[in-house]
Amino acid sequence: MQYIKKLNFVQFPPSFLNLARYNQYPSDMSDTKTSPANAGSPSPQPVIDLFQKCRDFTRADEVKAAGFYPYFRAIEENEGPVVQIEGRKVVMAGSNNYLGLTAHPKVKEAARLAVEKYGTGCSGSRYLTGTLDLHNELEARLAKFMGKEACLLFSTGYQTAQGIIPTLVQRGEYLVTDKDNHACIVAGYMMAKGMFADFVRYKHNDMADLERVISRLPAGAGKLIVSDGVFSTSGTIVDLPKLVEVAGRYNARILIDDAHSVGVIGRGGRGTASHFGLDASVDMTMGTFSKTFASLGGFVVGEERVINYLKHHSPALIFSASPTPASVAAALAALDLLEAEPERIDRLLKNADTMRKGFRKLGFRIIESQSAVVPVIVGDDMLAFTLWRELFDNGVFVNAFISPGVPPGMQMMRTSYMASHEDSHLETILGVFEKAGKKLGIIS
């Protein structure tokens, strides 16, 4: 324990960082040019090996050696609420498999049959040789399910933001984004910056600050407001009614990322806009297949003319191989189950609510929400690693989020729940948290 306290703890890999929180990007991304005043013989500069920073990065190795490394743990078997890691069964309390469909027999069978019929891959982009009738079917089904005119599939959920944002927001136009948006949105607006668009950020879920920021932009310029629907780290829901009001006053379009919303909130799991009864007020909704839909890929729904434009202009679509037959077939089967068994959503939300009440009763500090994500705040990097290890050793797997992936003081165990969690699983999770929390002095 004394050894681990001396370590500079490993940071989250970029996919876990909320990059928007950090002002680490230059305001001018244009090429640097040498001025005549600087012309002449350059001063000798030391030769630096590009890979030296890789060799100097040893923090992960130190944490591994101390036995507290929580990342890249290989899952050997997956039954949904219970997985096998390192040869033993543990209750999974950190997965985004919200409806518990990754192990559903109908989903697995659909993937198997698709491989038999279409093979393992499409060997081309949607634009050329990579479109199957399965892709068209899923797009039509999702557009209808989400109440929009059209849908477009992308190969990953992360790639979806990069396919939409820089394609739509370009020179002379503005992206307006929540500071706590997911890293895929951050990557999208950095790409838009490369297309000479401008972006501005507003305080997390603060609609007064959104109005302050957007009111300073040119009245006649095109604007796109982008926000998570359910924020992935905290599980909180965007204040969509007020966001819609601000967008209306300032001639802005709206894109909502419903990666953690579809299948969780809204009528029949239709996401954030449906949750607030604002389906017609949200211009575009994007999502992923890697959570509710038990697969891999992403999608966006919206007006047919907008989707058609993306289809013919988005580099992320045109220059990427299309989603695999098995992935699309699995997502279709999951959509069938979502529509046929809406009670799964009720069970999911009941499970998450049970855990919120349980954690509060035990004395843990949590972030309140109405989603499937229930963060338990620890407030310290070392304590987060230690608690994670105690939970894992006692048969419960969760996700440890440390700074700078979360603000200082907000280090947490990000727990998330599934419709397939049974009462006995929830009792086990709470029991293990209670034991570990008392041992470490987090609760009395």
Image: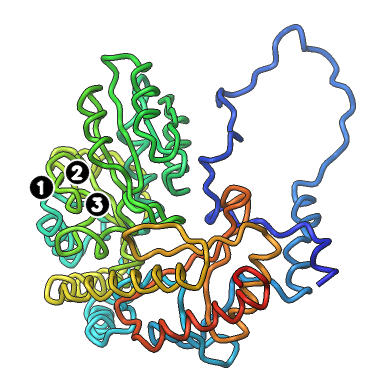
| Residue 343 percent location from the top left of the image | 17, 75
In the image, residue 423 above or below residue 222: below
Kindly indicate the quadrant of the structure image that contains residue 153.
Answer: bottom left
State which tag comes first along the sequence, 1 or 2: 1
Q: Specify the amino acid type for callout 2.
A: Ile
1 and 2 marks in contact (CB < 8 Å): yes
Sequence-wise, which precedes: disc 1 or disc 3? 1
Residue at image point 47% right, 62% down: 375
Quarter of the image with the C terminus in it:
bottom right
The foreground one among 276 and 224 is: 276
Along the line of sight, the residue nearer the viewer: 4 or 168: 4
* Separation of residues labelled 1 and 3 (CA atoms): 18 Å
Residue where numbered disc 3 is placed: 272
Q: Residue at x 43, y 28 (%)?
A: 199
Q: Do labels 3 and 2 touch, CB within 8 Å?
A: no
Residue beneath disc 1: 149
What amino acid is found at the position of numbered circle 1 in the picture?
Glu
Residue 62 position, x and y percent, is 79, 67
Mark nearer the viewer, 1 or 2: 1
Dot 1 and dot 3 residues touching (CB under 8 Å) = no
- Give neighbour class at mark 2: few <14, some 14-19, many 20+ (Cα, 10 Å): some
Q: Which mark is residue 406?
A: none
In the rendered view, does 235 fall on the left or right side of 9? left
Tell me if 374 is positioned left or right of 36 in this view: left
Left or right: 279 as drawn, with respect to 66: left
> Tag 1, which secondary structure?
loop
Rounded to the nearest angstrom, the CA distance separating label 3 from label 2 is: 20 Å
Quadrant for the N terminus in the image? bottom right
Q: Which one is earlier in the sequence, the residue at label 3 or at label 2? A: 3
Q: Which residue is mark 2?
A: 307
